[in-house]
Amino acid sequence: MANCQCTQTPINDSLTARKPKIVPLDDFDRESVPSQLAEIHRRLRRGGHDAFLVGGCIRDYLLGLTPKDFDTATDARPERVRKLLPHAFIIGRRFRLVHVRRGDATYEIATYRKEPPSIKVSKSARRFSPENTYGNQREDAFRRDYTINALYLDLSRNQVIDYVGGLRDLRDRVIRSIGPPEERFKEDPVRMLRAARFAAKLGFSLEPSVTAAIHANKKLLNHVSRPRMRDELVKLFLTGYGAASYRAMLKLDLLTTVFPQHEAARPMIEQAMVESDERFASGHKLSPTYLFATMLWHFYSDRLLKLEAEHGEHAQVGELRQQACHDIFQMTRRYISINREAEQFILSIFALQVRLERKRNIRRTLDHPRIRAAVHLLALRAQTGEVDPNVVTWWEKRQPPRDAKRPRKRISKQNQRTSRNEKRRIDVG
């Protein structure tokens, strides 16, 4: 992968020089902000610093949505924040942040930053250099991605501060880049995925220059680290707006970079997104690994057919299944991070599909720890016409309930080594 050199976007001086718009929120609902977070802000102010809520929580509140993540921006450096607040920990390398723990909750606090002179991409073209150049609130606003995410709320005065026209764009339901979008995407390609996610979640339209810049720069997503790409896909598809996010990604042609052959699997992926949204709305736990399995099933089955044709009738079917999975994992690892445990999960439910279709080894199949996920995948395949729905119904009536506990077997010392080895093998029967 070629190296690239990305310079920071020059923001127009006339924009940064204009006065911010300050809007009072006389009817602000203080109950919407956790009391522990309000106390954190008071401690920072008593310590001689400012403290503002910033970003998505302000955007969502002003749109009438329920804020979930509350981010704080302050002029205090991370070391100072840690000194002022108990149970505070500095994290991060590229961005040094402070996490403050209060009971089961963790609150993120960031120091104002400004654009550093340049951003470089390492030889691997996947990691950006650290960005810990501190600044003031105005500079911090202009280094953010979109105008609707650059609003600050002062809890002590119930005022929103807007340097970039974010309030106007919230009213007009437009996603607008702060600075030239093409340059902003070169700085951080993930901003393209965030544009698709915000458009899906909020029902906003992309400002035309943002759309054009995404089409021109989508290949820059190859420079995103695999773990970060995985995290962004989880945010896109597993937070209740999966179907809308998938449509936005299709419209912007962004999926081709992550799953080059996704079009052939489109019917199944679309159905998987609809189901994930329904499960999210019902409060069920969602599995990123299962979602990736649904997105990879078509590639796996297609690869398996090719391997069977190449090796003929005398090939070991189990070995071919493992080889097919190995091949698709190798392809996928070029774009997103999938650990070995996730790979074993996917291989397990793929291998179980044959047993389920043919109703083979019924007792053994029902005892398999991945039986529910495998039946769920079978049902998804039935909805796209791959499998007889009656077969799905047959297994759904017999599979163990969701919360069923499996008895633990006592293993003698002489069999412990054998047991460990068996755990490393995937059942492909």
Image (spheres, helix red, strand yellow):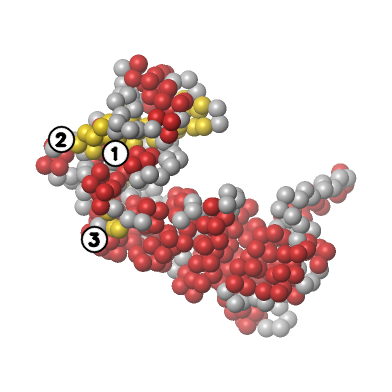
Q: Is residue 302 left or right of residue 7?
A: right
The residue that appears at 30% across and 58% down in the rendered structure is: 205
Instruction: List x then y, in percent, for residue 408.
Output: 82, 46
Q: Is residue 277 left or right of residue 388?
A: left
| Nearer to us in this view, 375 or 240 | 240
- Rendered view: 87 above or below 202: above
What's the residue type where badge 2 is placed? Lys
Instruction: List x then y, in percent, for residue 261.
Output: 47, 71
Q: Residue 151 — which label? A: 1
What's the residue type where badge 3 is placed? Pro
Instruction: Give the residue pinned by disc 2.
Output: 19
Classify the position of the N terminus by image quarter: bottom left
Instruction: Measure the C-alpha gap from mark 2 to mark 3.
Output: 26 Å
**Residue at disc 3, secondary structure:** helix
Q: Earlier in the sequence, mark 2 or mark 1?
A: 2
Q: Is residue 223 left or right of residue 285?
A: left
The residue that appears at 71% across and 66% down in the rendered structure is: 352
Q: Earlier in the sequence, mark 2 or mark 3?
A: 2
Instruction: Give the residue pinned by disc 3.
Output: 208
